[in-house]
Image (spheres, grey):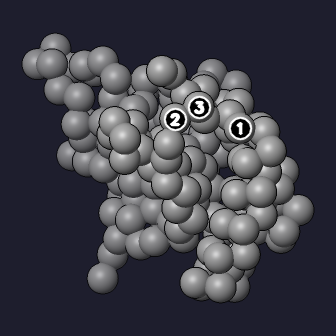
Amino acid sequence: MTIKTQELENLLEPVVSSMGYEFVGLEYLSQGRHSTLRIYIDSEQGVGVDDCANVSRQLSAVLDVEDPIASEYSLEISSPGLNRPLFKIDQYERFIGEEVKFKTIHPQLDNGQRKFKGTIHSVEIEDNTITFDIDDQMLIVIFTEIDSANIIAKF
């Protein structure tokens, strides 16, 4: 069964936004009978356990009514944390200059490399591309080629 994450986003993002939180993104981790729908939320004041519980109650009600996922799953509401995941191209633009680790769907270099660590150098929304500085070499990646990406926390 394929879960359409865009449809889930369209359903859930307005609910999260109406509660005063930023809808950062979602992950659906299909693990047989133990699948997980994880929703990341944020706010200027940060996100605590009570915030997650409130959003969970609201989203559970919407998911129960709309029933977009036919199989069993667990709903998790989380803050993005220190290793913030990046889901949308405008999030990359917001974090220009930050170091990230990311994985692409297809190899980006002749050596077959798909996993990278570098700094977000620039974002071209119109071209749907992100330029990364990887060891003083610029790598331009089409946004839809990025499988996953996270900010690398600085301590």
Can residue 89 be seen from the camera position used here?
yes
Give the residue displayed 59% in from the left and 31% down from the top.
Answer: 70
- What separation in Å lies between label 3 and label 2 (alpha carbons)? 4 Å
Q: Nearer the viewer, residue 48 or 59?
A: 59
Q: Secondary structure at mark 2?
A: loop
Can residue 124 be seen from the camera position used here?
no
Left or right of 39? Residue 134 is: left
Quarter holding the C terminus?
Answer: bottom left
Spot occupied by residue 5 in the image (x, y as percentages of width and height): 60, 33
Left or right of 24? Residue 11 is: right
Q: Which amino acid type is marked by label 3?
A: Ala
- What separation in Å lies between label 3 and label 1 (alpha carbons)? 7 Å
Q: Which amino acid type is marked by label 2?
A: Ser
Up the image or down, 72 lies above or below 46; here it is: above
Specify the label residue 36 is tagged with.
none
Q: Nearer the viewer, residue 31 or 144?
A: 31
Specify the label residue 70 is tagged with.
3
Q: Secondary structure at mark 3?
A: loop
Q: Quadrant of residue 152?
A: bottom left
Q: Nearer the viewer, residue 114 or 96?
A: 114
Q: Which amino acid type is marked by label 1?
A: Asp
Q: Quadrant of residue 58?
A: bottom right
Spot occupied by residue 111 in the image (x, y as percentages of width and height): 11, 19
Residue on which disc 1 sits: 67
Q: Secondary structure at mark 1?
A: loop
Spot occupied by residue 107 in the image (x, y as percentages of width and height): 25, 19
Spot occupied by residue 24 in the image (x, y as percentages of width and height): 62, 56
Query: Residues at badges 3 and 1 in contact (C-beta under 8 Å)?
Result: yes
- What separation in Å lies between label 1 and label 2 (alpha carbons)? 10 Å
Give the residue displayed 31% in from the left and 49% down from the top.
Answer: 101
Residue on which disc 2 sits: 71
Query: Residues at badges 3 and 2 in contact (C-beta under 8 Å)?
Result: yes
